[in-house]
Amino acid sequence: MWVSGFILKRRQFIKYSSLFLASSVIHACNNNVSQAPSSNEMSNGGAKKLDKITFGTNWLAQAEHGGFYQAIATGIYKDYGLDVTIKMGGPQVASGTQLLLGGAVDFFMGQGVDAINAIAEGIPKITVAAIFQKDPQCLIAHPNTGVKTLPDLKGRPIYISAGGSITYWPLLKAQYKFTDAQKRPYNFNPAPFLADKTSAQQGYITSEPLAIEKQGGFKPVVFLLADYDYTAYATTIETKKELVQKNPDLVQRFVDASIKGWYSYLQNPEPGNKLIKKDNPEMTDEQIKYGLQKLKEYGVIVSGDAEKLGIGAMTAERWQSFFDKMVKAGVFKPDTNYKEAFTLQFVNKGLDAYK
């Protein structure tokens, strides 16, 4: 079943740059669209030709990717002179960074921690927008066990993945005095958590709580880590630095159209949902509805700076604050030039710019 099995397994593969592409493709235009050169060139008939773009996502199609699919379904990308192909993520071999640098994709769905780690490793990619103001990562506990706030989990067994162990877990140790002694290996199976009412486990607010409710027969207690000082940007748009330098107009059009796609999806998701289910037939209406509901409920997309600056907003102050706290937690090296991980050139236009 999708909710109880497949979604839970997806987090096993999302580890920084280890994001994979499946073969399924959704295309921004119909199959009869010609191979398009630059949007500045014109076809013989006088119609504007479209710049072809490939965008890689971090997992199979779902509500968390809805704005990008919406921009295809409603023709927003085409309005911006773009012929966009979405390649879904999934349990394949190549990493997102390899695909980006190798030219297999033009843009990729990234996240803040990986962006800074990439700079430390000398990888020439850059974040140009942050669709998620809050990372959907959460910790999940049993109800009626005395756990009312995140600090209440101190000393209790917590199932954490390898990826979580090197991202938010060090911060939880530094901020809330959690210890490695309480950490248990999380293998993306909720059975150990369900069997132990004193325990907690990691998850995404958009999927695992629903899966646990279905399997366990109860509504779990959920703590969004972004509300407890884990302030990483997520579902970012990243690309090669070379593209930003050589074709900033193309980058701007893709960012603007994607942001408009997200505003459209939040208002009327049905067009995007149809493409999501076409690309990922195992996705259910229930899961899409739940995922979108949680994105709105927790302010994952529209909150903080995005409320005034627009979806995709980023600030230098927040990048610095996140970097500093993660340095103290031992995640980043203090001499990393984190400022090279992002640019504010393409975002923060204000709400009116995307109407």
Image (cartoon, rainbow, N blue to C red):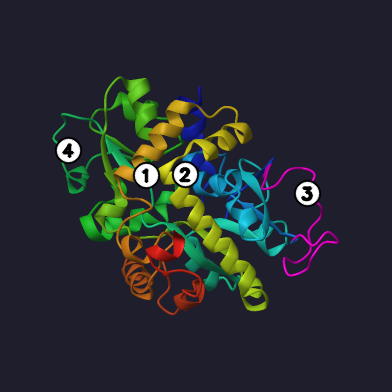
Quarter holding the C terminus is bottom left
Q: Earlier in the sequence, mark 2 or mark 3?
A: 3
Instruction: Name the residue tied to disc 2.
Output: 64
Disc 3 versus disc 4: nearer the observer? 3
Contact between labelled residues 1 and 4, with CB atoms less than 8 Å apart: no
Instruction: Name the residue tied to disc 4.
Output: 147
Q: Earlier in the sequence, mark 1 or mark 2?
A: 2
Q: Earlier in the sequence, mark 2 or mark 4?
A: 2
Instruction: Name the residue tied to disc 3.
Output: 33
Which of the 4 image quarters holds residue 334?
A: bottom left
Could you say whether the residue bearing mark 3 is in a helix, strand or loop?
A: loop
Q: Is residue 44 magenta?
A: yes
Label 2 neighbour load within 10 Å: few <14, some 14-19, many 20+: many
Residue at figure coordinates x 54%, y 45% from the top left: 70
Q: Which segment did they paint magenta?
A: 26-47
Residue at figure coordinates x 23%, y 40% from the top left: 156
Does residue 207 show up?
no
Between the C-alphas of marks 2 and 3, the distance is 28 Å
The amino acid type of the residue labelled 3 equals Val
